[in-house]
Amino acid sequence: MSWNPSQIAPQTVRAVRPVAGRLVDAVLHAVREENPVYADVLGGPEGVGIRLGIEQAVKSFLDAIERGERPSAETGEIWRRLGEAEFQAGRSLDALRAAFRSGVRAAWRGAAQLASEAGVPTDSVIALAEAIFVYSDELTNDVLEGYIRIESDEASERERRRRRLATLLLDAEGQDPDATRHAAELARWPVPRTLAVMALPGEAPGRVGRRLDIDVLAGSDQDGAFLVIPDPDAPGRTRALVRAVASTPAAIGPSVLPVDAHRSLRWAREALALAESGTIAGPSPIRASEHLAPLIMLRDRELAAALVSERLAPLLALGEPERERLLQTLEAWLEQQRHTPRIAAQLHVHPQTVRYRLAKLRELLGDALETADGRFELQLALRARAGLGA
């Protein structure tokens, strides 16, 4: 349907213009009656602005018909601003669309009635209806554009403020309580009593964050993406996190006070690195608090490698087949508390074979097998070797 004012008889405008106030009243009445959310609005200060917008739209419409051209752009901008005001007032886009539909129907009925009362020919009344529908579509686009424009601007500003808050919370050098509190107010994110930080691969936390029905802070830095999760131990929280993560590799740090948020992120990232290397395993998100031993042991990988080289040197110097047999026997001997039958069952060998291998281990490792400290260091070295990928 196109805008064609030439089909509208001049007497149509002359009939409608003097009683345009009745048309505006009819539109407002329909909106009020059919859309309860606007009932009080139209009776208050906000209603004045809406009425002025409708009056301007009617005047611009009639002026355009007389000139034989499209309505002025000024009216469109007025309705875009009305759309912005609707968002700022907290009313939904669905409510706005419903109110607009009510107004358009009332405008058509009112204009048709006024034209009919003035004796306007039927063809001109039909052309008037078509013009109203075309014009209302344009106004609909204008008001929705204004609504979505301010909504997008608000969302961008909110996201920027939340990223700023996340940066302050995760500052390893220490938080400024006043700055953090102010940033939380601007971001509309109440700082919880406890929180945890989830580490994610890559630079975009958005997909996992969008799946959560929890108000999280999402962000990323040079080390990857993260989500700051409020009240991580609340009922149902674990299920929500597992559902949101789905198949995405992720790790979550311990529940901490907000002042220790950086520590939760650090542990989460260390746990994620171990999970991605295959050192630790479990359903995503991996919980760092359930893998403290490997986290401690592999925190300094150079030290862990030095422990392996130092304590297992005599075995590492052997050829591969013998080296692996003896390492497996040593690990089973430590795990089974030196109980030969259980060691043999674990390794699927004869007990005499175990005794032979243990004699070889004593020859190579000496007193390390005979003291508690020596056995503890050997077990650490074996686990570190596995964690480092041999």
Image (cartoon, rainbow, N blue to C red):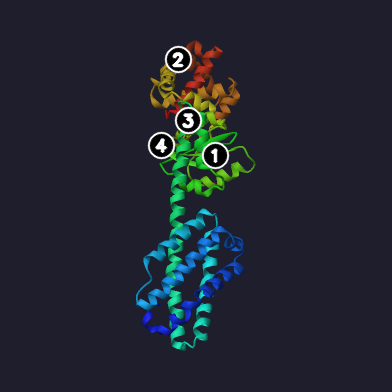
- For marks 4 and 2, give the CA distance: 48 Å
Q: Earlier in the sequence, mark 1 or mark 3?
A: 1
Determine whether 284 is above or below 77 in the image: above
Q: In this view, does 310 lie to the left or right of 296?
A: left
> Gap in Å between the C-alphas at discs 3 and 2?
39 Å
Choose the circle earlier in sequence order: 1 or 2: 1
| Picture coordinates of residue 45, whole percent (x, y) | 55, 58
> In the image shown, does 28 or 250 lie closer to the viewer?
28
Q: Residues within 10 Å of mark 4 (few under 14, many from 20)?
A: few
The secondary structure type at the circle numbered 3 is helix
Q: Mark 4 points at which residue?
A: 221
Residue at 54% in and 35% down: 196
Q: Residues within 10 Å of mark 1 (few under 14, many from 20)?
A: many
Is residue 44 visible from the viewing direction of this image? yes
Q: Mark 2 points at which residue?
A: 364
The quadrant in which residue 8 appears is bottom left
Q: How many labels does the image show?
A: 4
Residue at the spot of label 3: 266
Cα distance in 3D space between marks 1 and 2: 51 Å
